[in-house]
């Protein structure tokens, strides 16, 4: 016969004798990780002003480019060469075309025109061309000669601006007094949630943030924002139309492959002393880097199939691959992490500031003020305009 006694369902779903069964835990699924900030680590110092500045310098350049279309009597015999920057050269310099074997000796410099001895030291003749890069091997001084004219470089001051990150917290007295589920103190919980959001936004701004074009230091009507890594990179900004990425067919963008990544890393290495040690990318480009591995490291006895590249080692740097969802999906950053720091303004790292309450509540504000110090933008690189699908 059917059961006729008292059961949990006897009074419907709201039987008052049965206690609610709610797990004492709160599940959070929203992404808030900060992989680039974690990789860079804590800064060694703090910023001391809302305008943070640093000094950069460079050595005297030892390359230049030929700016000449006609060579008299011929490209293999011309002794007068016009270059873009004549003051880079001195009498006594040995120079060589970057792709040539012939060495030439500079005997006179007049403005941007060099007079040279061709096939110096019996080196084989070669044809000069417009746009050819000339490399200065070194200068040979005459024994007992006077000192050469003094040459030097001027240091350059660079800057960035601090950005204030803030969020408010307000919890009523009743909520704090009531027993919560999964939360022992609602005020502390709200602090943690807002802090996660601010850290997420800090990483996003470190990567993508842009400083205001007018009054970047801020004023009564202008919010002060930091310049992020991507907008700061100018020299090594590679797209399918600007190299070293080969253009795609028609309107197609270039699919990231090892040739493209190595070409970009080589271009950075050729004109700076940096060694790329960090590659930052989004999900699709990370999968493309994983596909560089031909042997997936799977043997018959293995029970795990590996399809992952965490460290990419090339001739131009050993780089950790950092997966960040805050990267633009068509872009890959190549960074020298030793030249990057995310600095708080002194005494302004993320903290909670209690505020005066005007009623029956606890009120406060989470505040942090940070900037990005990015030394030598030409020590870093950006690949942009990459394809987002294999098809």
Image: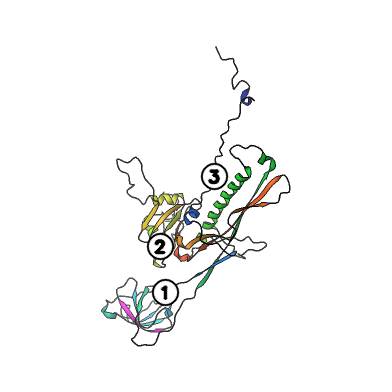
Mark number displayed over residue 61: 1
Rendering coords of residue 149 (x, y %): 43, 84
Q: How crowded is mark 2: few (under 14 residues within 10 Å), some or many (20 or more)?
A: many
Label 3, label 1: how many angstroms apart (C-alpha)? 50 Å
- Reading the image, the residue beneath label 2 is 275
Q: Is residue 183 left or right of residue 255?
A: right
Q: In which quarter of the image is residue 274?
A: bottom left
Q: Is residue 381 visible?
A: no
Label 2, label 3: how many angstroms apart (C-alpha)? 35 Å
From this viewpoint, which residue is outermost toward the right?
Answer: 358
User: Is residue 107 in the magenta section?
Assistant: yes
Helix, strand or loop at mark 3: loop
Give the residue at x 41% y 67%: 273
Q: Which of 145 and 105 is in front in this view?
A: 145
Does residue 86 sit above or below 274 in this rendering?
below
Q: Can residue 317 be seen in this view?
A: yes
Rendering coords of residue 22 (x, y %): 58, 33
- Reading the image, the residue beneath label 3 is 30
Give the residue at x 35% y 50%: 293
Rendering coords of residue 51 (x, y %): 58, 65
Q: How crowded is mark 3: few (under 14 residues within 10 Å), some or many (20 or more)?
A: few
Rendering coords of residue 30 (x, y %): 54, 44
Q: Is the magenta stretch mostly helix, strand or loop?
A: strand
Label 2, label 1: how many angstroms apart (C-alpha)? 19 Å
Q: Nearer the viewer, residue 276 or 73?
A: 276
Q: Is residue 171 left or right of residue 227?
A: right
Instruction: Provide the residue span drawn in magenta.
Output: 101-112
Q: Which of marks 3 and 1 is nearer the N terminus?
A: 3
Q: Earlier in the sequence, mark 2 or mark 3?
A: 3
């Amino acid at each position: 016969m059917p059961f006729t006694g008292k059961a949990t369902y006897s009074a419907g779903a709201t039987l008052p004798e049965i206690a609610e069964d709610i797990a004492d835990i709160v599940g959070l699924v929203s992404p808030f990780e900060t992989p680039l900030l974690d990789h860079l680590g804590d800064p060694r110092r703090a910023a001391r002003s809302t305008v943070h500045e640093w000094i950069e310098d460079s050595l005297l350049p030892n390359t230049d480019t030929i700016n000449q279309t006609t060579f008299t009597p011929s490209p293999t015999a011309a002794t007068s060469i016009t270059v873009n920057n004549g003051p880079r050269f001195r009498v006594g310099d040995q120079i060589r075309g970057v792709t040539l074997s012939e060495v030439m000796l500079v005997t006179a410099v007049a403005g941007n025109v060099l007079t040279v001895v061709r096939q110096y030291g019996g080196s084989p003749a070669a044809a000069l061309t417009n746009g050819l890069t000339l490399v200065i091997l070194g200068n040979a001084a005459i024994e007992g000669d006077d000192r050469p004219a003094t040459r030097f470089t001027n240091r350059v001051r660079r800057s960035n601006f601090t950005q204030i990150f803030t969020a408010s917290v307000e919890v009523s007295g009743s909520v704090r007094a009531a027993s919560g589920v999964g939360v022992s103190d609602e005020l502390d919980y709200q602090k943690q949630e807002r802090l996660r959001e601010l850290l997420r936004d800090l990483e996003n701004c470190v990567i993508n943030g842009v400083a205001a074009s007018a009054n970047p230091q801020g004023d009564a009507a202008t919010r002060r924002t930091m310049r992020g890594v991507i907008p700061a990179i100018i020299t090594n900004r590679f797209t399918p139309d600007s190299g070293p990425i080969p253009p795609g067919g028609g309107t197609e963008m270039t699919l990231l492959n090892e040739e493209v990544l190595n070409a970009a890393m080589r271009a950075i290495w050729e004109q700076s002393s940096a060694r790329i040690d960090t590659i930052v990318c989004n999900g699709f480009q990370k999968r493309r880097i994983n596909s560089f591995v031909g042997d997936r490291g799977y043997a018959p006895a293995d029970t795990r199939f590996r399809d992952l590249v965490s460290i990419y080692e090339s001739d131009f740097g050993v780089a950790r691959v950092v997966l960040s969802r805050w990267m633009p999906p068509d872009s890959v950053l190549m960074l020298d992490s030793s030249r990057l720091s995310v600095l708080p303004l002194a005494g302004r790292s993320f903290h909670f500031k209690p505020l005066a309450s005007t009623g029956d509540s606890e009120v406060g504000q989470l505040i942090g003020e940070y900037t990005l110090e990015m030394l030598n933008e030409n020590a870093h690189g950006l690949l942009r305009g990459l394809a987002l699908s294999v098809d």
